[in-house]
Image (cartoon, rainbow, N blue to C red):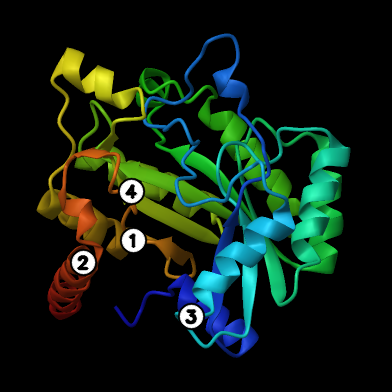
Amino acid sequence: MDDIILLSDFLKSEFGGKVAKISLNGGFTCPNRLNGNKGCLFCTDTGAGEFSGNAEDSIQEQFISSRHIMDKKWNRIGYIAYFQNFTNTYGSLDKLKKVYNEALSQQDVLGLAVATRPDCLDDKILDLLSELNQQTFLWIELGFQTSNENTAEAVNRGYANNVFKSSILKLHDRNIKTVAHLIAGLPGEDKTDFLNSVRYLNDLRPWGIKFHSIYIQDNSPLLDYSIKTGFRPIEMYDYIDWLTDALLDLDKGIIIHRLTGDPDKGHLVSPLWPKDKLRVLSEIKRIYNLKNNLSSRS
């Protein structure tokens, strides 16, 4: 996989050493959870932030606690403060400034990553992000998941593709790095749908991309959906087949932030194969290299 740029390698090259992300909980929620709505079908009650800090703790307390653990794992030169769960631009400008600046003020923080929805980026928020982009290494993660509008409606994504496209282009106009999330195996989708989503993103040229498969946790609406409909998540080698074809199609300038999901093992219901992340990554590398070698010979 030497022709693919992984985030860890990019950050090491950019900063001269190991850089780790620390997930922080800014105490945000999501507009897709208002009026009794439970959000996207696949989203957990932690807003996909199973490994984020406790919102009752200050940003500094969360950072110090996580850093204490990470400092035992690696010799690193710094951290990216990562606001991961729920929608981290869904709040007042004063709150956004407060939590972002508190994160950036922590020792050895080299940059900021903010996960959000494309329908939560108005002009004032974009102006704030532009200011931050001048001050630090910033990227914005946008939930996208699929280019199939029917699937997006079925999983209750809550916005159309043109909203995503408009938001990512506005971020590009401001030279703000973007990362798009894609999920393989959403209800009703096949490999063609997944590869179409990759090609859709190729045209928009995000700075980075995150891949993972659909999985069911006991704290997400997808569990009830699977019981009612008989939906079954994608199997490991199907996912690897889809993913490796996607990687072959993907513009090689796009940085890979994630190759497989990282579910909370205590809440995971099905399938169980994402628990063995090292095995999955090893098989992705092996099969990608096989396909890449075959394509280069043809």
Which residue has dot 4 on it? 263
Q: Which numbered tag is attached to residue 72?
A: 3
- The residue where tag 1 is placed is 259
- Whether residues under marks 3 and 2 lie with C-beta atoms below 8 angstroms apart, the answer is no
Residue drawn at 31 percent across, 62 percent down:
247
Picture quadrant where residue 192 is located: top left
Q: In which quarter of the image is residue 124?
A: top right
Mark 2 near mark 1, Cβ–Cβ under 8 Å?
Answer: yes
- Cβ atoms at labels 2 and 4 below 8 Å apart: no
- SS label for mark 4: loop
* Whether residue 276 can be seen here: yes
* Badge 2 element: helix
Q: Name the residue under label 2.
A: 284
Amino acid type of the residue that numbered disc 2 sits on in the rendered structure = Ile
Residue located 25% across and 62% down the image: 277
Residue 32: x and y, percent?
A: 56, 22
Q: Nearer the viewer, mark 1 or mark 3?
A: 3
Give the SS element for disc 3: loop
For the residue pair 2 and 35, the one nearer the viewer reads as 35
Q: What residue type is labelled 3?
A: Lys
Q: From what the image shows, is residue 216 above or below residue 237?
A: above
Instruction: Please tell me which residue lies in front, 170 or 180.
Output: 180
Q: Which of marks 2 and 4 is nearer the N terminus?
A: 4
Q: Three-letter amino acid code at disc 1?
A: Leu
Q: Residue at x 47, y 52 (%)?
A: 51
Q: Distance between the residues labelled 2 and 4?
A: 18 Å
Alpha carbons under labels 4 and 1: distance apart: 13 Å
